[in-house]
Amino acid sequence: MPFIDHVSDSDLERLALDRVVPGLLACGFCYVDGLLGELAGDAVLDQVMEMHRSGALQDGRLAGSVPGVHRRNIRGDKICWVSGSERGCEAISFLLNLIDKLISVCASRLGCKAIRERSKAMVACYPGNGAGYVKHVDNPNFDGRCITCIYYLNKNWNAKEHGGILRIFPEGKSYVADIKPLFDRLLFFWSDRRNPHEVQPSYSTRYAITVWYFDSEERAEAKRRFRDLTASTQQQGSSSG
């Protein structure tokens, strides 16, 4: 793909060191505009819109269902998980590779123990019917997620008319941060309790791609806890039989 060559490693390094690292350390979040440029950004948007058209996006699930509370009152997005290696995801793969490089430059300077892996990418669409996502924390219980990265794909977005703002409530601060989901904007923030956030109701179709980078030690510990829990549940099941 011809658009893939235009971002050099030295540009990424400068971006990471001048913007991302200072922003995360000082505020706990930061964003970069014009990440890919029009051509590459359009290619990513085309692939996401095709996924939407083809029916690949399904209702986002909740970690725990609350009796009597409708899922759509909590989160109204439609999502799909992609690795980037799927057919028709070449531009998304390019984007993920670029974010990987940015994070790898940042990681050693952020005091994180070790960031060596990330989630698949969550492609999400809020269909524009007033859907949003209530205030929540991505990683409230030490599941390993360390940094949340969200890439926005919405051209000519007018927040007054379309809503859809991501509002961050930085822990212990007297202010909130309102991030508009503008085309070719990449947002970074700590995934833990430092950054509760919400997606305000969207009145126009709103696209985003999210990936989470893991703190390796915390992730390994979370997997251990899960294995232990599963084993003890199975044990209880067999002994009560």
Image (cartoon, helix red, strand yellow):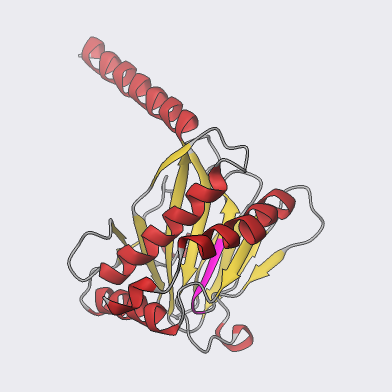
Residue 102, given in percent of the width and then of the height, sits at 50, 56
User: Is 28 displayed left or right of 218 in the figure?
Assistant: right
Q: Looking at the image, which is closer to me, 100 or 175? A: 100
Residue 36, given in percent of the width and then of the height, sits at 45, 74
Please give the name of the residue rendered at 44% of the width and 29% of the height, measured from the top-left corner. Answer: 222
User: Is 83 displayed left or right of 148 in the figure?
Assistant: left
Residue 115, given in percent of the width and then of the height, sits at 47, 40
Which part of the image, by quadrant, shows the N terminus?
A: bottom left
Q: Looking at the image, which is closer to me, 209 or 24? A: 24
Q: Please, what is the dominant secondary structure of the magenta stretch?
A: strand
Please give the name of the residue rendered at 49% of the width and 76% of the height, measured from the top-left corner. Answer: 184
Which part of the image, by quadrant, shows the C terminus?
A: top left
The answer, for residue 135, to whether it is visible in the render is no
Task: Provide the residue span drawn in magenta.
Answer: 183-187
Please give the name of the residue rendered at 79% of the width and 53% of the height, measured from the top-left corner. Answer: 173
Q: Is residue 149 magenta?
A: no
- Number of dots carrying numbers: 0
Instruction: Report which quarter residue 83 is drawn in.
Output: bottom left
The answer, for residue 97, to whether it is visible in the render is yes
Instruction: Report which quarter residue 128 is drawn in.
Output: bottom left
* Residue furthest to the top: 239
Q: Is residue 185 magenta?
A: yes
